[in-house]
Amino acid sequence: MARRITSDHLALGRPIVLERRVGRAQRKARSTIIGVKGPSYLIVDLPFVNGRPIPGPDDKQCIVRLVSEGSAIGFRAKVARTYLEPFPMAILLYPPEFQEVPVRQTERVSCSIVATLMPDVETPAGSEVQRAAAAQESPPAPEAKKADSSSRTKRKNAAAKAPPPRPQAPLQAMIVDLSRGGCQVAIPILEPDRPSEAPPELRERVAPAREGDYHPDGLRMLFIPERLVSADFDLPEPAPGRFREVQCETRWTRIHRDTLLAGLRFLKCPDPLARSIETIVQHQQAFFRQPIEPA
């Protein structure tokens, strides 16, 4: 959707991405807005990739991408002039309108966000109370529609077992990918008398007195499918926020190199959390979707 470019979009100091396309070749580099002169001039730092400026001295235009007001936007700009002295900079002519990029709700971003998790062992996984809460707070996930009868039977059998003991403290974890629909978390596996191959940033967050909570058998019992989990985490820039007791449902688990990976679905994504995730996804799309190609 086309919208008019205003001075709010082109704030001084705002990080941007400059993109150069020649045929199918594409190069990107990060830059910063250092000046604006209405109605159409934009001054930016001139970035270099492998010793070559973007845009180059022979380039007639480039693509400018940025995130503003929670939206990822982009537009083609004409290259008026580039300078190397007194410092590298480029003067661009921007158009009156930009193209707004819609972001899919299910778009995921890779991340490393510290989190703590507390499984709800008092509500049996797959119980009527839990299913009613999930149905009221969130539409069923697409994967749920595909679950076959054997998968449902396995979940019922697991839910029928005696509940595991509640951890004495929230479990240390790392969110490794994130979307509006949910997240994937990594939890370290620790066993006595055996070195753990879990990432150090996960192991080091576990107090020695709590290592017993991270035995693989106990973690498997805690994170069976449909188990409710309460998650606490802080989101970083560009959309910082503190989020506590975010209610999730365990969808799946697997073990990889002494790490329990679990897929969690948000039963209800609060509006502030949804807005923060959208901004982070848009920032990822604008700046980090494709790496800079080598020369």
Image: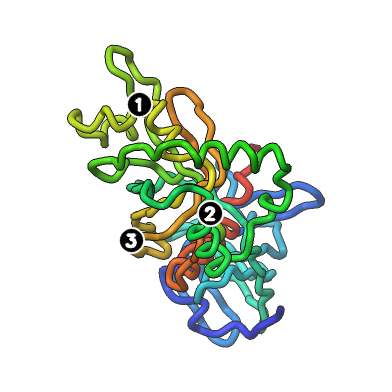
Instruction: Decide which of 116, 222 is in the foreground and name it.
Output: 222
Residue identifier under label 1: 215
Q: Callout 1, which amino acid?
A: His
Callout 1: SS:
loop
Q: Residues within 10 Å of mark 2 (few under 14, many from 20)?
A: many
Numbered mark located on residue 15 in the image? none
Q: Residue at x 57, y 42 (%)?
A: 156
Residue identifier under label 2: 265
Task: Please state the horizontal and vertical placement of residue 168, each as a whole percent of the image.
Answer: 23, 41
Callout 2: SS:
strand
Residue 279 visible in rendering: yes
Q: Is residue 137 left or right of residue 237?
A: right
Labelled pair 1, 2 in contact (Cβ < 8 Å):
no
Mark 3 and mark 1 lie on one chain; the one further toward the N terminus is 1
Q: Residues within 10 Å of mark 3 (few under 14, many from 20)?
A: few
Position of residue 133 relative to residue 221, above or below, is below
Residue identifier under label 3: 244
Which image quarter: residue 142?
A: bottom right
Q: Callout 2, which amino acid?
A: Arg
Q: Callout 3, which amino acid?
A: Arg
Labelled pair 3, 2 in contact (Cβ < 8 Å):
no
